[in-house]
Amino acid sequence: MAPASARLSQCPDINLCAWSDENFNGIFKRYPDSAPHLGGDNDRFDSLGNRDAYSWLVFEHANEGCARRCLRPGCTVSKLADVSGNWHDRISSLKKHTRATCPAGYEAMGSHYGS
């Protein structure tokens, strides 16, 4: 089955959205809650959009393991390969933070919609 094309506008409020290809294309997934294991979506994503009021934390390994980054509310990353450390196909778990700010020790990534 061919991947469905998706755009940032298809990401509903109160979700972290992810796409398998850069520039918000390819297979589209939305996450309203934390996901300690991405299963078949492990190491798949190349762009992200945060339409939530809270920051989202992304991790290189399942169960919040290894390298980590933070995506603040209203921010997107159109090409994860451009993020410090090259996050192309590296995300294996997600955690919805309890605040809009990034926790200490988490590097923020992305830019605000329309920037």
Image (cartoon, rainbow, N blue to C red):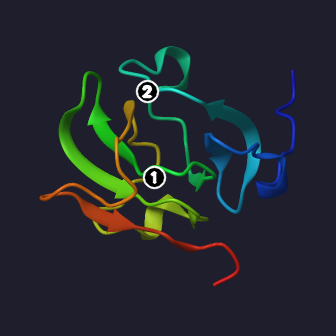
Q: As shown in the figure, which amino acid type bears the numbered disc 2?
A: Ser
Q: Tell me the number on the disc at residue 34.
A: 2
Where does the image place residue 71, in percent across and percent down from the top left? 43, 57
Label 2 crowd (10 A; few <14 / some 14-19 / many >=20)? some
Location of residue 48 with respect to 112 vertically, above or below: above
Which residue is outermost to the bottom? 115
Q: Tell me the number on the disc at residue 88.
A: 1
Q: As shown in the figure, which amino acid type bears the numbered disc 1?
A: His
Q: Mark 2 or mark 1: which is in front?
A: 2
Under circle 1, the secondary element is loop
User: Looking at the image, which residue is at 58% across and 48% down?
Assistant: 52
The quadrant in which residue 97 appears is top left
User: Looking at the image, which residue is at 83% across and 55% down?
Assistant: 9
Location of residue 33 with respect to 90 vertically, above or below: above
For the image, the number of numbered tags is: 2
Location of residue 86 with respect to 61 vertically, above or below: below
**Image quadrant for the N terminus?**
top right
Task: Estimate the spatial distance between the alpha carbons at disc 2 and disc 1, rounded to whole Å.
Answer: 20 Å
